Each structure stands twice: as C-alpha cells, then as structure tokens.
Amino acid sequence: MTDLLVVLAMAAVTYGCRVLFLVHPGRTPSGRLGLFLERFPLALFVALAAATLLLPEESVDPVPGYAALGGAVAGGLLTRRSLPGVLAGGIAAYWLARWLIG
Amino acid sequence: MLGHPSFRRGLRDGAVLFVAVGGIGVAYGVLGVQAGLAAWLVVLASALVVSGAAQFAWVSLVGVGAAPTLVAVSGLALRHIPMSARVASLVGPRPLRVRLALAWVLVDETFGLTVAAARRGEPDLVAYKAAVDLLLFSGWVAGSAVGVVLGAQFDPAAWGAEVFFAVLFVGLAAPLVRSRWDLLVVAAAIGATFAATMLPPAWRITAAAAAAAAVGAVLPDD
C-alpha cells in the first residue's frame, strides 16, 4: 500500500510540474526569461548526456562512454545531425570500444 | 487524426523513441523486480509517472523510505517546468483538455522532438506531439512489462542501456545547436555538470541545466 501511495505521489509531483504553464496559456515569457527557456532544452540534453558519458560511475570503464560520445558527434556530422545518425554512430563506437577493450 | 500529415511525421520521428525508450523500459522493469517491487506496480508506475529518471530513482531508493524518494523525484521533476512553459508558447491557445493531455508525456525526448519540429515549421504541433507521445508511452510501458517478465534473468548493464540513453540525448541536442552562442551553452552545460557533482544526485541535472541556460540567457539571440 505504501509503495502504491509513493507511486501516486510521484505521478502527482511530476505531472504537476509538467502541466504548470500549460494551464496558463498566453503567458509567453520574453526577454531574459524567454532566452532562458529557449536555451534550456540544449543545456538539459547536454547535461543529461555528459552526466553519463563523461562522468561514469567509478566501477565503470569510461573509455566506451567517451567512444560513444565521439561516435555520436561523428554520426551527427556525417548525417546532418539526424537522430538515427547520431544513435548509430554512438552505439557503434560504444560496442567497438567494448570489443577492443575486451 | 491517423491520416493527419503532422501525426504521420510524428509517428515517423517517434519510431526511434519507441525502440530506444522501450529498451530503457526493459532495464527499468528488470531493476524494479530485482529491487523487490511488485511487477504490477512497476508497470503501473510507468503508465502513471512516465519518467525514466524519476522511476529509476524510485527503484534505487526502495527500502530507504517514501520521503527521500519524493525529494529526489521532486528535484528531477523541476526540469519539466521550463519545458511546460516552452511547449505552452509553441502550441499557443488550445482547449484545456488538449493542454492537459500534452502535459502527460512531456518528457525529455518528446520535448526535444517537438522543439525540433517547431523549428522546422511543423504546421500542427499538437498532432505531431500526440504521435510522438503515443510511441514513447507505449514503448515505455511495453518495455517495462517485458522487463518485469525477464526479471533476474537479464543484466541491463551488460548491453549498455545507460549509454544508449545518453547517446539519445546527444541526438536530441544536436539540432538545437544553431550558432556559436549555442556552443557556449554546450560548454557551460558540460562544465556545470562537472561542478554539480558537489550536489545531491537528484538535483545535479536540474542545477546544471539551469546554470547553463542562465548563461545562455545573457548571450545574444542569433
């Protein structure tokens, strides 16, 4: 029962944050706040990727993560930054590095 | 809706999310049952919370108590507030039921594709996001269900599930880099991610992203 309540609370907190501005349409932020929101997605995705690829847990060999990052960037450059191209490059480089390391 | 061009483009772009997020869902499902949670609850959480980060935090904190879990989840959920504001400004005035539905699967990946679609002039962002949401949601829930069935027979780390997720975020960030100023935001985000290791784990990503976006807010918009 406690676990179910935790799940419901998690859902309420998460959905509450997601719906906050959507229930107040027409309040389009401008100026510095507008620029902050404009650049937040880029900052978020880079932080999410860097946290895993550049700062792996101590028990994890960092080289495959670095290779994945390099492969992803190369894949993006070769395919005009397409998502499948980035994924293919990153995953291929990751597995190649793991295979080479053994 | 199914024949709408924007919806079809959303299905096309979201297909990769179905596979990628489905794979992460398998890892989450495996870890959930390995942590001792009921299989039905692990899958129900995927349908109700729809947040990989929050659910992985929950699974890793099983046994610690409800309060630390909710603090961690709150820290992770804060990053959805700027997303909510951005999507609200992109879709404009819409009926309340549509806006409530748009918020349900407002996650990093659907947000990234929606922003990218808006930048290339997608005519109906609601139809586009509905398709992307549908694929991510079904991939996430189905993956979670497969994971709880596989249970202890499977080691997600062995096939690099975490790296797959990270590479996906590189792919979502790539089209958002349009100027040299955006490259400075990238550098700031990497630096802030390193600096944020001083903070509790649940707050690191939100703090790093907010700091880098704050740097971006004082840079020129071109």
Image (spheres, rainbow, N blue to C red):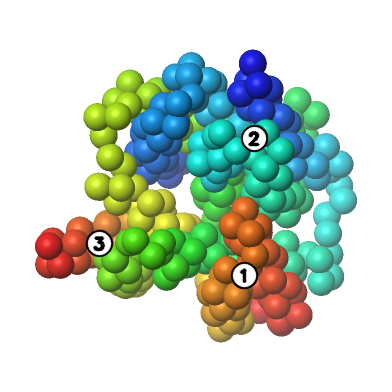
> Disc 3: which chain?
A
Which quadrant, please, contains the N terminus of chain B? top right
> Disc 1: which chain?
B
For residue A26, above or below residue A40? above
* Residue A75 appears in the rendering: no
Instruction: Give the left or right position of residue B43, taking residue B125 as reference.
Output: left
Gap between marks 3 and 1 measured at Cα? 28 Å
- Is disc 1 in the same subunit as disc 2? yes
- At 44% from the left and 32% from the top, the residue drawn is B35
Query: Mark 2: which amino acid?
Result: Gly
Camera-side residue of B210 and B170: B210
> Disc 2: which chain?
B
User: Which residue appears farthest toward the front when viewing the image?
Assistant: B64
- Is disc 3 in the same subunit as disc 1? no
- At 75% from the left and 42% from the top, the residue drawn is A17
Query: Mark 1: which amino acid?
Result: Met
Total number of numbered labels?
3
Q: Nearer the viewer, mark 3 or mark 1?
A: 1
Q: Which residue is mark 3?
A: A94
User: Where in the figure is residue A26, as x and y percent of width and height?
Assistant: 86, 47
Camera-side residue of B210 and A87: B210
Query: Mark 3: which amino acid?
Result: Tyr
User: Where in the figure is residue A35, as x and y percent of width and height?
Assistant: 74, 69
Q: Which residue is mark 2?
A: B65
Q: Which residue is mark 1?
A: B198
Instruction: Give the left or right position of residue A6, taking residue B165 as reference.
Output: right
Instruction: Give the left or right position of residue A35, taking residue B23 as reference.
Output: right
* Residue B181 appears in the rendering: yes
